[in-house]
Every structure is written in C-alpha cells, then in structure tokens.
Amino acid sequence: MSTIPEVVLERTERTAAEVNDEIRALWSRSGGTLTGEQRREYQRLVMEWEAAARSTK
C-alpha cells in the first residue's frame, strides 16, 4: 500500500517553476514561520513540485 497521496501520482498540470513560485509566495506571506495549516500546504506543494519536476525528465 502506497503512502503517497493520489494527487501526487497524477500528472500535474502546473510546471515545477509555477509550483515553486507558489512555494516562494507562501514563505513570503508567512514571514518565515509556517503555521500548522501552512506547513501542510507547503508539504502538499513540495510533493506537487516533485511530481512536476519528474514529469519533465
């Protein structure tokens, strides 16, 4: 059984650069300290970024 969320297994519609921009914006909005909700969003974005980066290889 996989522990990777299904959303990561699907091909992403956004490029790694687009997701990276969203990650940077999240950190900028947070002032460098993430709340619990922001941390979960960051983790989701990192997984999406990784999937996007793999799909371009």
Image (spheres, rainbow, N blue to C red):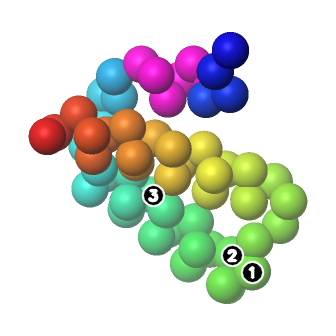
Residue at far top of view: 1
Vertical position of residue 16 compared to residue 23: above or below:
above
Spatial distance from mark 1 to mark 2, Cα to Cα? 6 Å
Residue in the picture at 49% in, 68% down: 25
Nearest to the eye among marks 1 and 2: give it.
1
Q: x and y percent of residue 54 in the render?
A: 27, 40
Kind of residue sitting beneath label 1: Thr
Look at mark 1 in the image and give the residue it sits on.
33
Q: In the image, which disc is placed on residue 7?
A: none
- Amino acid carrying label 3: it is Glu
Label 2, on which residue? 30
The segment highlighted magenta reads 5-10
Q: Residue at x 34, y 22 (%)?
A: 11
Marks 2 and 3, how far apart at CA:
12 Å
The residue labelled by disc 3 is: 22
Secondary structure beneath label 1: loop
Image quarter of the N terminus = top right
Q: Earlier in the sequence, mark 3 or mark 1?
A: 3
Give the quarter of the figure containing the C terminus. Answer: top left
Residue that protrudes farthest toward the front in the picture: 1
